[in-house]
Image: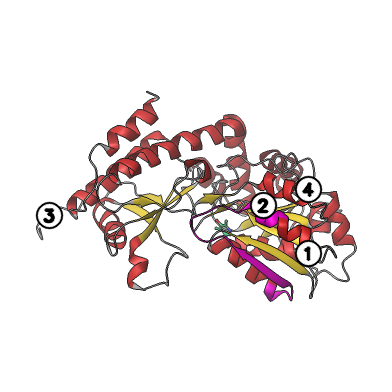
Amino acid sequence: MSSRTNLSQGRGYLAIPGPSVMPEAVLNAMHRPAPNIYAGELVDMMPPLMQDLRDVARTQHHVAMYIGNGHGAWEASLSNVISPGDKVLVPATGRFGIGWGEMATGLGADVEVMDFGKQSAMDLARIEERLKADTAHEIKAVLAVHVDTSTSVVNDIAGVRAALDSAGHPALLMADCIASLACDRFEMDAWGVDVMVTGCQKGLMVPPGVSFVFFNDRAAEVRASMPRVSRFWDWEPRANPEEFYQYHCGTAPTHHIYGLRAALDMIKAETIEAVWDRHTILSRAVWAACDVWGSEGTLALNIADPALRSHAVTSLRLQAPQATQLREWVQENIGLTLGIGLGMAEPGSPESHGFFRLGHMGHVNGQMIMGMLGGMEAGMAALDIKRGTGALDAAAKVIGGV
Ligand SMILES: *Cc1c(COP(=O)(O)O)cnc(C)c1O
């Protein structure tokens, strides 16, 4: 079909699990001349911004902001509470748990990984058992990823707190909510999380560039007992600044502050509960379509149990190399970008072409999800990929509430 007309002109849809779709309100807020960083509006914007961030994270405690991406927040969080030689436990459920552990290794920590594989959530009983066995309380922190973006599993963070408590273990509970914040329900204080890291470019709908570390008083005490903390990563002056420049340890991320203000206003107007509900329904629509497609052929959701699936991202399999072929087809022909598989197979290996992911985090609504699913249907039709029929009907019923 070399004469086929290309249908990719028009607004594209970046359906990858971060960066997410940027709202016009965020982009418009960022499109402005450089503001003064010594006085005026920008300076006054910070206290309410910090408060609104706390509200989204459901915490009364502290937040430090960093110019950096998720990896920066990983390093920031560890730098404040982990010294060389300290032991950390990493219950891994995908590539991102492993990645946070690698950052800890880079800082000289003694990292113990409990690998729960690529298709399961953390086994809380095994975590509790491991903590109970640590009678000397050598483990200083548990690094728990809420939603592992590679596998799209959601972990029970409150359950990890319960495991720590039932083992009577004093380790800090540190949670990675980079994929999940403002998508999947997360309650920092109610769930007993001591430290939480997130970035701005997923559920918070802002271009990559700033990230956050939230911490409670227990974590602040651990920070206070550290032999040294590098000045740039130190969360103390950022969370309790006496001068404006201390929020950012230097020049403020001026335009990100405006973008974040617009994004937090949107979340506030919708309410965080409604944001969670919207992601719940949109992800159910995605799964409904995938279940129907998967009733024939090889398409399958990576996480079998719906209760363990994230509402921010969905990891899928297809007979290799069809996952890559589908991604390439929808990209080239209809302006739809789907996410690559991550951490499921050796990059570039034949098997790696059997995995892909759908991002449905942040500024996403019903028609965008139907458009994404419709685009996938078109791609699978064009490529003659075997699949069940009626997937879009199934998704439409979820979106339509029938
Ligand atoms: C995206 C992501 C990261 C890494 O964030 P970067 O901005 O790419 O450094 C870490 N953890 C999780 C769960 C993520 O989704």
Can residue 69 be seen here?
Answer: no
Image color mode:
secondary structure
Disc 3 versus disc 2: distance between alpha carbons? Answer: 56 Å
Q: Secondary structure at mark 2?
A: helix
Q: Quadrant of the N terminus?
A: bottom left
User: Does residue 109 belong to the magenta stretch?
Assistant: yes
Pointer 4 residue: 166
Given the image, on which type of amino acid does mark 3 rest?
Arg
Question: Of marks 1 and 2, which one's residue comes earlier in the chain?
Answer: 2
Q: Quadrant of residue 388?
A: top left
Q: Range of the magenta residues?
A: 105-128
Q: Residue 346 or 240: which is nearer the viewer?
A: 346
Question: Of marks 4 and 1, which one's residue comes earlier in the chain?
Answer: 1
Query: Can you give x and y, in whole percent of width and height, for residue 103 in the image?
Result: 66, 70
Given the image, on which type of amino acid does mark 2 rest?
Ala
Disc 4 versus disc 2: distance between alpha carbons? Answer: 10 Å
Q: Is residue 176 left or right of residue 192?
A: left
Question: Of marks 3 and 4, which one's residue comes earlier in the chain?
Answer: 3
Whether 340 is drawn above or below 200: the answer is: below
Q: Residue 228 or 12: which is nearer the viewer?
A: 228
Pointer 1 residue: 139
Which is in the foreground here, disc 3 or disc 2? Answer: 2
Q: Quadrant of the C terminus?
A: top left
